[in-house]
Amino acid sequence: MSPLSPLPFVRPAAVAGRHFSTVIVGAGINGVGVFRDLALQGVDCLIVDKGDFSAGASSAPSRMIHGGLRYLESGSFSLVAEATRERNLLLRNAPHLVQPLKTVVPLSSFFGGLMSSALKFLGRTPPQRTRGLLAVAAGLRLYDLLGRRQRVMPNHHISRVQPADRLLFRAAVRWTATFFDAWISHPEWLVLELVRDACRDQPRSAASNHCRVMGCAGKTLTLRDEVTGEVVQVTADAVVNASGAWLDRSTELLGGAGPRVMGTKGSHLVLDHPLLRDALGGRMAYFEALDGRVCIVYPFLDRVLVGSTDIPVDDPDQIATEPAEVDYLLDVLGEVFPNLAFDRRDVVYTYVGVRPLARSDADKPGQISRDHSVVIDAPSPSRYIPVVGLVGGKWTTFRALAEEATDEVLRLLGRARTASTRQLPIGGGTDMPQGAQATERFIERIAQDAGLARTRAQALLRRYGSQALRMAQHFKVAGDEPLQHAPDYSVAELAWLCTETGVIHLDDLVIRRTLLAIRGLVTDAALAEMAGIAGQALGWDAGRERQELHNCASALRERHGVRLATAAPDTDAAAPAFHAPLTIHSALSPS
């Protein structure tokens, strides 16, 4: 969809009284994947979310697109085969956002972990012991074999630890195993691209964030605009429940069966640590802590990303990265990289999401399957339409889960599949230049056509893919003046993001539409500048702007560990009731 095409993002009032073939509840990656696939079949859909697009777990992954190497120990071969295939497809379909990630596994022993791996495969709970060369080599050989379809990356290899890595890893490391997975720079943007692609293919479809489903009676769904409080109704022939960790709550509102899911939270840290970033040399380190937990660390843009914890939680609305989790992950880094120093001053951002796992009796969260399934709640005397529920899943396999769910919806609607998303480029991944020379020519074209510096053209290409050219031309008309306090973005770019991508609140813009927050580049001055741009673009009055600034600053401090000044909102201005200050409750510390 062209940046200047009619927008798919609407408020609930715009769809009041309308009929849709399908209403999708939950606008994370799985729900949006279904939205995209159904639109491709010509099915008109409405997708809604009580928060922002991808504001739940979809905005808080390890930002890896991977096959799940560790799932081999539990015998999840079909899941790994599916995930590695989907990883390979995303590398082709979204090359502007998904890139190969060279991964190194430090190894200290030869035979370690063989018995442990065998016991896990048999469903037993073994004592913790780090895996040695033979166990990892066997796993990686199988990993390469399962991921051979659509493969675009080299196979693994194992070698003696190199001199530079002797200085990086602990002294006991004797070998390193190297393999390739992938990473995604901006998962929230890919979600928005899928929404736009869907509404391009089926213009009768629409998407509404900050819109809560209140219930379903007959064929009528009641929706509430979380901004204005307005209540509207729409009718549908089917409902898809893609609300992730909130699945059981949504199921209860929709009159279905349960419970079906359980949540575990994963906290991540983003560090400003140039020494570690340089030492990693573009690679991810995939390793086991001394307590047996698998952790990752890799260069993320100009920072280092570290993850993650895996802690059971009951309420996905009340989570935060706890101080004990920060200490745990920093301690793990100290174990693996003993020649480098780590402390809280290195942490510029934290984030946490709740993994929506299928309900299980497993002893430890890491033993719960990451597989997915589609369940059907048949029509009932009070609800005349079926509900298709999405249980479990992970970021990498969203397209496969969406395909499975779409086939169920099509069956219920009595319609046939007419196209596949398997080879379908996403958003700015369409017509991306291939190879270094073609990329350079495209960057030069952006720079010349829009009168931009080459570095700015390059940044837009990395950010928006092939859409960068039209966007740059649009920004040129407005002057493309860089932000004073965050010059990686321009005033025109932020204004465009506000008006063209469904931004409702300031944190929608700051945290999910840009990469400024996760890179630790949001200062008090930058946030105030962004609030002023958003206020002008969206028509906020002075009171609304001050309240948005206060709420976004609170979210950044309390949920993401950003060091901002504490300031109370202006009490002289009447604040809208829907902008209550954020409250964060304590969550469990790492087990």
Image (cartoon, grey):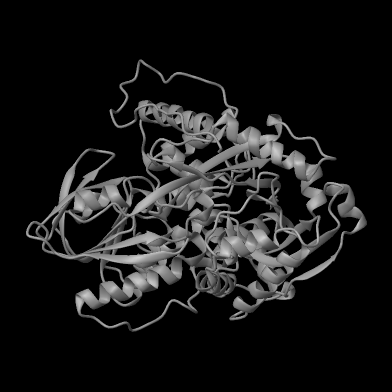
Along the viewing direction, whichever of 437 and 264 lies nearer the viewer:
264
Q: Between residue 230 and residue 281, name the one nearer to us.
A: 281
**Could you tell me which quadrant the C terminus lies in?**
top right
Depth check: 383 or 157 in front?
A: 157
Residue at (86%, 53%) from the top-left corner? 165
Mark yes or no: residue 179 visible: yes
Tell me: 207 left or right of 440: left
Q: Residue furthest top?
A: 572
Residue furthest left in the image: 381
Q: Position of residue 227 (x, y in %)?
A: 28, 39
Query: Can you give x and y, in whole percent of width and height, for residue 7 in the image?
Result: 35, 59
Q: Nearer the viewer, residue 123 or 256?
A: 123
At 64% across and 72% down in the image, what residue appears? Answer: 143
Image quadrant where one finds the N terminus: bottom left
Q: Position of residue 391 (x, y in %)?
A: 36, 60
Looking at the image, how many numbered discs can be counted on the residues? Answer: 0
Give the residue displayed 33% in from the left and 49% down from the top. Answer: 209
Residue 401 vertical position relative to residue 515 in the rendered view, above or below: below
Q: Residue 355 in the image: x percent, y percent?
A: 46, 51
Rendered image quadrant of residue 571: top left
Image quarter of residue 164: bottom right
Eyeballing the image, is 332 above or below 569? below
Any part of residue 484 in sight:
no
Q: Is residue 98 left or right of residue 368?
A: right
Q: Residue at x 22, y 49 (%)?
A: 252
